[in-house]
């Protein structure tokens, strides 16, 4: 997945405060390869802002990424920052087009690490089909940041057939999850805790815009709601849906797709996979009569081969999400209370 | 300038990691008053992203703010983060409309400080006439950030008469600065160094979009270029213009507007005001025949009463900015090399 982007030869090995000055060193850093790697006609203008040609309803979304560590099995913070915002746009029913990219670097960061993050940005942009068109670089003193923080903000036109709105969720709607739960969170946790498994648990960070586009092309208004269960996990998203619709959600534990190794890691650490953060995962709330067809189609999309129907919307218990366990017991699922895994994205 | 926004009663006094979890505590923080303070129809939808109705050429720009201290004479980081991005949009010739707002908070931040920053955001939005329509909140461990970092990203339609483009700069064009130099940088520096003057030097942080709009309404395509000389100061912007146009810039020291107290502070600290960061300042490169008229009009705009013509574009010394000193000597002005004042914005 990594592009061949050899790092340019530079006369500095670490990021210094001067690289955030806006002056000569900032220009030298950007000219050393940043503009070259991210090259496109709009960025090449190098104005304070980009000029885009947008028309009609446009989605606009922002996220700051503070994940630690910045390199993890299956990705790095650069690639995550692109996918995260691409996916938030897709969840609005939009076709992601343009991103802004803003770095807050900690003084002393090895330029080699900055470069790897930047290549991660580029690779993720190419896979998702989006462009970075404007950016910013700040540097803070050592101990006032943590290596790399990234903000990406994205825009994209709404899919012409999209009618994503929490108010369109109806009793009987089926809840489809696009893949296996808890993979990203457990990938990060395994690194932090030094857990060893037979194979490395890799983050599921990926773009979801192509899969969402295919769904909207085919099912348009029958897709009532899209959400990506990142921080707070699947449980938090479902409780939010119940809260915002005033309806209930029934969830079937035995239908939750989860990799056995990830399930094992969760058990070992006493974590409930329903609350663990995901990155390359989305939840679609789909009209009942189209759900089977939508599921079949999702399974053919990239990164969605493990998609499954995990529950449905109901009038039975308004504003509550109720999980039916594998052995038939029922319990109410609440929103994540404290912080299970800080700095997961 | 401060709105009356009494802080809500909360059951927590400091920001904890849980407030960045995406779960219950994040929701509690947002519901405690964030949504209420920033209230508007689009934000109220509380989706992952906002849906905007944009049409035609649209400017898109991003900035992260890491200023230290977060409260300073004349403003705070919240108000700066709004004005900074509003002004970058204005420099594109755009009419700022919508902002995203993304916080990276350090664990332990007093909620009272967060609230004051938020009120700063609100006040600046109202003055500029823009709305925050989407946002994000992350929290990092104590010692991994520095109180508050903010990213704002903005969009706005291009002014129909704007033709801002570095390629439109021509020999003979006059260079107008909208106000006094070096005020923001010296306000921050005075606080950091504990300098005392007869009166406090206050940051010039303000919005420039209303002044720019008036200029574009009146002079349209005769405004060839707009730039705000923030980090790197006026010198860096002018050297960039010389570099990007291949033309020369003549600068007259005696025409540079500067507050005597700010000039004194610069001298005391051995800083050249040409390199000190500004916030509420812009440079307009204007067709020669309209420059006097444009200057007269600018002086009637908010925050621009000290506007002055400070130089002109020339073919005399391609790619170089040359300063004529008060006593008639000439020297080449280069881009800021190191970092004069870190974390000025």
Image: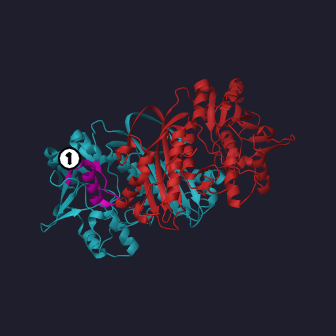
Chain colours: A red, B cyan
The front one of A296 and B188 is: A296
Question: Which residues make up the magenta segment?
Answer: B226-248
- Give the percent coordinates (x, y) of residue A186: 70, 52
Q: Is residue B5 above or below residue B46?
A: below
**Disc 1 element:** strand
Q: Quadrant of the C terminus of chain B?
A: bottom left
> Horizontally, is A86 left or right of B209 in the view?
right
Q: Is residue B43 above or below residue B7?
A: above
Q: Is residue A171 above or below residue B95?
A: above
- Give the percent coordinates (x, y) of residue B240: 29, 54
Q: Quadrant of the N terminus of chain B?
A: bottom left
Q: Is residue A296 magenta?
A: no
| Residue B345 appears in the picture as rendered | no
> Horizontally, is A222 left or right of B293 in the view?
right
Report the label total: 1
- Give the percent coordinates (x, y) of residue A12: 43, 63
What's the residue at 41%, 54% (across, down)?
A32
The front one of B306 and B21 is: B21
| Residue A50 appears in the picture as rendered | yes
The residue under label 1 is B286
Q: Is residue B243 magenta?
A: yes
The front one of B310 and A115 is: A115
What's the residue at 27%, 52% (across, down)?
B243
Mark 1 Cα shell of 10 Å, populated few (<14), some (14-19), many (≥20): many
> Horizontally, is A137 left or right of B317 in the view?
right
Q: The residue marked by circle 1 belongs to what chain?
A: B
- Give the percent coordinates (x, y) of residue B16: 62, 61
The front one of A135 and A60 is: A135
């Amino acid at each position: 997945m990594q592009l061949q982007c050899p790092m340019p030869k530079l006369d500095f090995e670490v990021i210094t405060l001067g690289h955030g000055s806006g002056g000569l060193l900032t220009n030298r850093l950007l000219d050393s390869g940043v503009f070259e790697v991210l090259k496109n006609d709009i960025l090449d203008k190098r104005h304070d802002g980009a000029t885009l040609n947008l028309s009609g309803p446009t989605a606009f979304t922002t996220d700051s990424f503070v994940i630690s560590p910045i390199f993890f099995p299956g990705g790095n913070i650069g690639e995550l920052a692109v996918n995260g915002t691409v996916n938030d746009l897709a969840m609005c029913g939009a076709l992601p087009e343009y991103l802004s990219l803003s770095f807050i670097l900690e003084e002393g960061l090895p330029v080699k690490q900055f470069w790897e993050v930047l290549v991660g940005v580029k690779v993720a942009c190419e896979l998702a089909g989006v462009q970075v068109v404007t950016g910013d670089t700040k540097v803070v003193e050592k101990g006032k940041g943590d290596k790399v923080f990234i903000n990406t903000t994205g825009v994209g036109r709404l899919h012409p057939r999209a009618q994503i709105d929490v108010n369109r969720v109806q009793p009987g709607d089926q809840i489809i999850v696009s893949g296996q739960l808890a993979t990203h969170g457990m990938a990060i946790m395994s690194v932090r805790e030094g857990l060893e498994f037979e194979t490395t648990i890799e983050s599921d960070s990926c773009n979801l815009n192509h899969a969402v586009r295919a769904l909207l092309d085919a099912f348009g208004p029958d897709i009532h709601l899209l959400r990506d269960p990142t921080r707070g996990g699947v449980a938090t998203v479902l409780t939010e849906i119940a809260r915002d619709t005033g309806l209930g959600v029934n969830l079937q534990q035995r239908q939750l797709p989860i990799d056995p190794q990830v399930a094992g890691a969760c058990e070992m650490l006493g974590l409930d996979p329903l609350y663990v953060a995901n990155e390359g995962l989305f939840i679609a709330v789909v009209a009942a009569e189209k759900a089977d067809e939508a599921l079949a189609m999702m399974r053919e999309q990239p990164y969605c081969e493990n998609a499954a129907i995990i529950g449905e919307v109901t009038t039975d218990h308004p504003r509550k999400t109720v999980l039916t366990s594998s052995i038939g017991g029922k319990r109410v699922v609440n929103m994540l209370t404290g912080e299970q895994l800080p700095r997961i994205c």
